[in-house]
Amino acid sequence: MNSPAPHLQTKGPAPGAPDFLYEAYETVGSTNALCLERAVSGHPGNLWIRAGVQTAGRGRRGRAWTSPQGNLFASLLLIDPSPLARIGELPLLSAVALAEAVDKAAGTLQLVSLKWPNDLLVDGAKLSGILLEAETLKDGRLAAVMGFGVNCVSHPDPALYRATDLRSLGYQVSADSLFAALAETLAKYIAIWHQPDGFDRIRRQWLKRAAHLGQKITVRAAQEEITGIFDDLDASGHLVLRLDNGQKRTVYAGDVFLSGE
């Protein structure tokens, strides 16, 4: 038996980014999944979908994402945003935009640090999750979805990481105000990204907030664990480790841990 369609609460220009469309729902399974449904149905993109609650929120590598009322759950659908080879730059772009949005909404300066590729940390505890998904549609268009979950008023107790939320940190930031800030900053950074040197500018912004830069970390990839000094990001945003033998190793995917965690 199919689940009932989610009830649309608001539709129109996105708060903070009037050139983007916006749909808000009380409850959905997953904002990312709903964006992909819109893409399959032929939507032209530049669409934000937001929910008060998700019943089937998901994080990276298929993990569940706890989605209670009061936190921010929103996804942006882009259609053919760039050549496929550059889609891997979007996680860093999204992290920089969200970090700036948190500062804007909370009235802070550099509150969060960034853990590669796109986790926001405060004193080592995870504040948010960002999930990028891309799918080539039957008509040949590329649908890219950037999904955001931010702990505004509560946080889960995940198995892999410590977590926190803005209220616990002493900041009264509503999901509404944070979304408006995020829609504005993400629109700004997408415009920067399309400029000739745009991603290099975004990469440098990411490095200014980098957690663990210069420290020994372990990256747990699908088939191996790699330990080394977090040395840099390459031109495409991949992690560069300096190994004990002095050689450098580029890492394309994996979960980052401080050595000993």
Image (tube, rainbow, N blue to C red):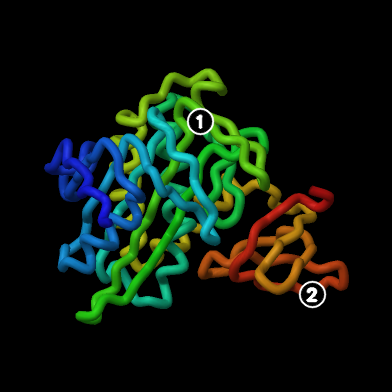
Q: Identify the residue shown where x is 20% and y is 49%.
A: 5
In the picture shown, does residue 170 fall above or below 5? above
Residue linked to disc 2 = 247
Q: Quadrant of residue 112?
A: top right
In the picture shown, does residue 77 fall above or below 27? below
| Helix, strand or loop status at disc 2 | loop
Q: Is residue 224 left or right of residue 148?
A: right
Label 1 crowd bin: few (<14), some (14–19), many (20+), radius 10 Å = few
Q: Is residue 80 left or right of residue 147?
A: left
Q: Quadrant of the N terminus?
A: bottom left
Residue linked to disc 1 = 109
| Amino acid type indicated by mark 2 | Gln
Q: Nearer the viewer, residue 16 or 67?
A: 67
Q: Residue 167 at x, y = what percent?
A: 50, 22
| Helix, strand or loop status at disc 1 | loop
Q: Identify the residue shown where x is 45% and y is 32%.
A: 103
